[in-house]
Image (tube, rainbow, N blue to C red):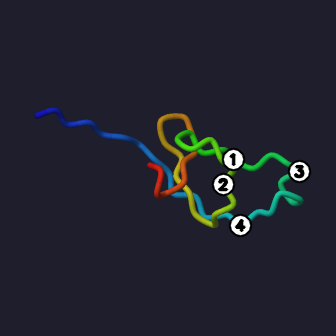
Amino acid sequence: MRLMLFCCTWKEERMGEEEAGGSLPVCAACKQRIYDEQYLQALNSDWHAICF
């Protein structure tokens, strides 16, 4: 059995595209912009919670 530990950060931000200046994070899995209030930062990438 292989055990892998990941360091991830749970972000809680609410940001529309206007406030972000067009720089919303992009999900590493589905490649869509993340508009959710909560998302993960892990493996040097941003992720929707359901995509991680």
Q: Is residue 13 above or below residue 6?
A: below
Pick whichever, 40 or 30, lies toward us: 30
Q: How many marks?
A: 4
Instruction: Identify the residue shown where x is 16% and y is 32%.
Output: 2
**Which of the two labelled residues, at mark 2 and mark 3, occupies the earlier sequence position?**
3
- Is 1 placed left or right of 51 in the picture? left
Which residue in the protein does label 3 denote? 21
Q: CA distance from mark 3 to mark 4?
A: 13 Å
Which residue in the protein does label 1 denote? 25
Label 4 secondary element:
loop
Instruction: Identify the residue shown where x is 50% and y is 51%.
Output: 9
**Which of the two labelled residues, at mark 2 and mark 1, occupies the earlier sequence position?**
1
Is disc 3 surrounded by few (<14), some (14 to 19) or many (20+) residues within 10 Å?
Answer: few
Which disc is residue 35 wearing? none
Mark 3: amino acid:
Gly
Residue contact at pointers 2 and 1, CB within 8 angstroms: yes
Label 1 secondary element:
loop
Residue contact at pointers 4 and 2, CB within 8 angstroms: no
Which disc is residue 34 wearing? 2
- Image location of residue 15, percent across then percent down: 76, 63
Mark 2: amino acid:
Ile
- Is 17 placed left or right of 34 in the picture? right
Instruction: Identify the residue shown where x is 54% and y is 46%.
Output: 41
Q: Is residue 46 above or below residue 19?
A: above
Residue contact at pointers 2 and 3, CB within 8 angstroms: no
Pick whichever, 20 or 33, lies toward us: 33
